[in-house]
Each structure stands twice: as structure tokens, then as C-alpha cells.
Image (tube, rainbow, N blue to C red):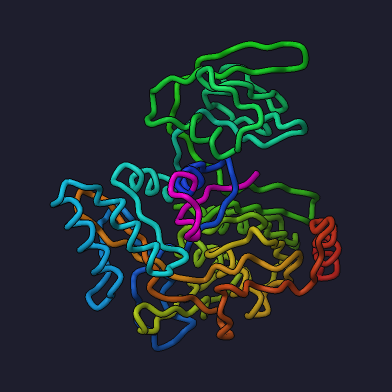
């Protein structure tokens, strides 16, 4: 299992399923968009240019600029629906669906607040990772230390049988996650569990928990693995800290498999851990060109291998593309997802928000990501970490 799905799913998923995936946080893996950074002018000297400004906080209520026809249509449809006593959110969804915006999505006020929490690296739940096991059972794959489930004695390997009396057997993981999450911290949920021949029920209080999106492991004295499952707030600095703490001469395995993306500014900060400065990516908003730069002072000499797969998306692809194009890392694994579009929030009546595509990202060499992804330097499908360690040893990071 992997990190949180932070931003909209492609059009075509029913709204409920999409939002379940958005807010499943550490419980399921899904696609994510890039969240728009503030526009920064092109600096006179790239190496001295500023790092990317913080991505738009969805709670700030920013809207798209004038001239965006879809945004105007969405706002108008929502306002007219509300005036007629109908659902403004549903009317906005219909406009977005007709627009052909694959990554467009509409949230009501409560959903967008949860979305903002996800970007901040928080979610409301009981602290379980779950997956479908043989026979259709839902199995606990990990328990978050200190969370409600851990305090109740739930262990990895337990079978999750019921949620408030509802049978989880054979049900989609997204539906299971939605029921576990509930509506608010402090609300209660009764889960039925199985462990071998034993069955029992525990009532848990949901809580606001951190998503734990950066994990660091010393695989040996000379190999440090940094796994990033999503670029939530603060994740970029945690990557930088991990690189600074790595032993002298140790190589880095940067594992971005299943990374669902998130805040572009955090991905740029992570890039700054490995680059001396310079260009990370370019992007356009309504046709106006912008650029993102790494801050100076990164470790540009330490051996680095980036591990990617088809679940590496959006902001994670932006980081991968920068390190690959700049010749800073060898990439190993399989082709990434291909999500390189820019979304901007449009505020609607009643507090609903539409996320609409307004531009696209490109790597330093000008490679467009959307629908294409990134091809690794060493394409492998089996045991990519083993291959990555072999490559790292050849770069000077002994495994």
C-alpha cells in the first residue's frame, strides 16, 4: 500500500468513488494531480533563482483568473442551480464532465476541507492499512503506531470482517476505507476482526492522524533508502534532512514507486536536496510560461538512484524528470503514469470548489509528462529494488 491520493481522479470515476480515493490517505493508492504553485517570474540567474513558492493552499479560496471559459461556466451553472433550489455541486459536476477535462473535479465544502487536510499530511481515521487478500477477505497490512487501531491491539495480518455490522468480505477496498473513515474525529466505529480461529469486535474512536509520507531506512552502512509516498506539506524538507543525515559516502535509493503526487513546492524542495540549484521544471498557466528552480546547496555528488513505476505520478514525475534530465540520478523501474497537468481551484457558491486544468508541466529538457510519463534509464519489472542497488553499487554506493 502507498500514500494518500491528494487531488482529483480522472473524469469517468463516479464522484463517490473518486472522493473516497482522495480521502483514503494512507489506506489506498490512487492518482493525484499537481497542485498549482504561485506564479514566479523567471529569475535573472537560474542558479540563484528562488525555490518554488508554496503551492496554493485550497483553503485560501483562490479562483481562476478571468478568461477561463470552463471556470465561468461552472460558476454560472452552480449559481443558477442554487437559485433554483437545486444542487450547485451537481450542476458544476455536469459542466466539468462535459468539458472533457480529464482531471477536473468538484468538491462540496466539507470534502474540500478534507482534501486540504490531506495536503497538510493529515487524515481522519483509525490508523489501518488494508488490502484484499485471498478469498476476497480484507486484511490489515499495517497498523499506524499510536493510532486508535494500534491501541486496541489490532495487528498486521488480522482480517477485517465487519464495520458497524456491515460485512467487509468481498467488498471493494474503497468502500471499506470510506466506512472506516467516517465523518469526523471523535466519532466511533465498531470493527469486527479475525485472527486464525479467533473473532472479536472492538469499538474505536476515530482520530486525526499523520500520513507518514516519508520513510528512511539504512539498508547498509553505505546505502540509505528514502521512500516518499506522497508530497504532502513538509515532505520535501524531510527528504532534505534525510540526505543531510546520511553517512558520508553513502548512496541514496529514492523510492517513488506508487507516489501519488501532491504539492509541487514539496517536490521542488526534495529536488533541492540533490541539486546545486537551477531548473526543476517549467509550466504554463493559461498560456503564460513560468519556471520552478531548486534552491542552492543540495548534495550534487552523492550517488543517487530513483526507483519508479506506473504508480509514480504528477509531482513525483516532476521530481524524477528533473533528476533524470539534469543527469543527477539513474532511474530504474517501469514507465511512470503520465500526469503532468496543472489544476487551479475555482470557488463556487455555498463553499463548493471546482479543480480545473489550466496548464501543463515540462521537465528541464522540455519533455511533456501528460499522457507520456517518464521512461526509466533501466527498465525492469521484477525486483526493481535489487536492480537499483546493483546500479547504485556501480555509481559508488556499495550495497
> Height in image: 226 above or below 149?
below
Magenta stretch encompasses residue 9: yes
From the top left corner, tell me how far across and down residue 262 is, in percent. Answer: 48, 57
Please provide percent x and percent y for residue 256: 65, 58
**Residue drawn at 63 percent across, 72 percent down:** 373
Q: Quadrant of the C terminus?
A: bottom right
Q: Is residue 321 above or below residue 14?
A: below
Relative to 5, say whether 47 is above or below: below
Between 189 and 273, which is closer to the camera in this rendering?
Answer: 189
| Residue 41 lies in quadrant | bottom left
For image coordinates 56% across by 32% down, the residue present is 176
On whether residue 161 falls in the magenta region, the answer is no
Taking 261 as reference, is 64 left or right? left
Q: Is residue 297 left or right of residue 263?
A: right
- Judge whether residue 235 can be spotted in this image: yes
Position of residue 159 in the picture relative to residue 127 (left or right): right
The percent coordinates of residue 195 (x first, y second) are 73, 17
The range drawn in magenta is 1-17
Amino acid at each position: 500500500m502507498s500514500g494518500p491520493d491528494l487531488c482529483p481522479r480522472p473524469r469517468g470515476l463516479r464522484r463517490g468513488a473518486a472522493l473516497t480515493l482522495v480521502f483514503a490517505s494512507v489506506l489506498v493508492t490512487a492518482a493525484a494531480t499537481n497542485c498549482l504553485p504561485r506564479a514566479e517570474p523567471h529569475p535573472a540567474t537560474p542558479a540563484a533563482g528562488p525555490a518554488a513558492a508554496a503551492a496554493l493552499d485550497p483553503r485560501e479560496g483562490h479562483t481562476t483568473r478571468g478568461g477561463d471559459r470552463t471556470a465561468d461556466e461552472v460558476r454560472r451553472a452552480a449559481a443558477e442551480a442554487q437559485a433554483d433550489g437545486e444542487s450547485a455541486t451537481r450542476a458544476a459536476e455536469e459542466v466539468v464532465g462535459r468539458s472533457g477535462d480529464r482531471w477536473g473535479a468538484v468538491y462540496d465544502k466539507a470534502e474540500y476541507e478534507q482534501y486540504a487536510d490531506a495536503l497538510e499530511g493529515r487524515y481522519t481515521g483509525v490508523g489501518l492499512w488494508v488490502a484484499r487478500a485471498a478469498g476476497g477477505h480484507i486484511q490489515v497490512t499495517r497498523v499506524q503506531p499510536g493510532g486508535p487501531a494500534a491501541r486496541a491491539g489490532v495487528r498486521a495480518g488480522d482480517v477485517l470482517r465487519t464495520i458497524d455490522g456491515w460485512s467487509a468480505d468481498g467488498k471493494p477496498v474503497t468502500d471499506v476505507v470510506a466506512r472506516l473513515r467516517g465523518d469526523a474525529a471523535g466519532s466511533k466505529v465498531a470493527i469486527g476482526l479475525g485472527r486464525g480461529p479467533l473473532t472479536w469486535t472492538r469499538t474505536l474512536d476515530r482520530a486525526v492522524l499523520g500520513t507518514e509520507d516519508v520513510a528512511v531506512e539504512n539498508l547498509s552502512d553505505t546505502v540509505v533508502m528514502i521512500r516518499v509516498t506522497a508530497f504532502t506539506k513538509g515532505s520535501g524538507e524531510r527528504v532534505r534532512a534525510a540526505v543531510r543525515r546520511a553517512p558520508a559516502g553513502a548512496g541514496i535509493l529514492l523510492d517513488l514507486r506508487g507516489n501519488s503526487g501532491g504539492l509541487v513546492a514539496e517536490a521542488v524542495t526534495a529536488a533541492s536536496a540533490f541539486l546545486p540549484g537551477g531548473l526543476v521544471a517549467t509550466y504554463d498557466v493559461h498560456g503564460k510560461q513560468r519556471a520552478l528552480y531548486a534552491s542552492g546547496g543540495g548534495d550534487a555528488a552523492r550517488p543517487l538512484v530513483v526507483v519508479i513505476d506506473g504508480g509514480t505520478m504528477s509531482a513525483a514525475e516532476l521530481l524524477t524528470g528533473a533528476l533524470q534530465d539534469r543527469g543527477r540520478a539513474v532511474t530504474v523501474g517501469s514507465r511512470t503514469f503520465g500526469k503532468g497537468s496543472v489544476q487551479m481551484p475555482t470557488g463556487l457558491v455555498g463553499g463548493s470548489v471546482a479543480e480545473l486544468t489550466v496548464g501543463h508541466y515540462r521537465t528541464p529538457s522540455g519533455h511533456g509528462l501528460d499522457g507520456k510519463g517518464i521512461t526509466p534509464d533501466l527498465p525492469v519489472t521484477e525486483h526493481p529494488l535489487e536492480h537499483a542497488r546493483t546500479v547504485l553499487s556501480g555509481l559508488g554506493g556499495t550495497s
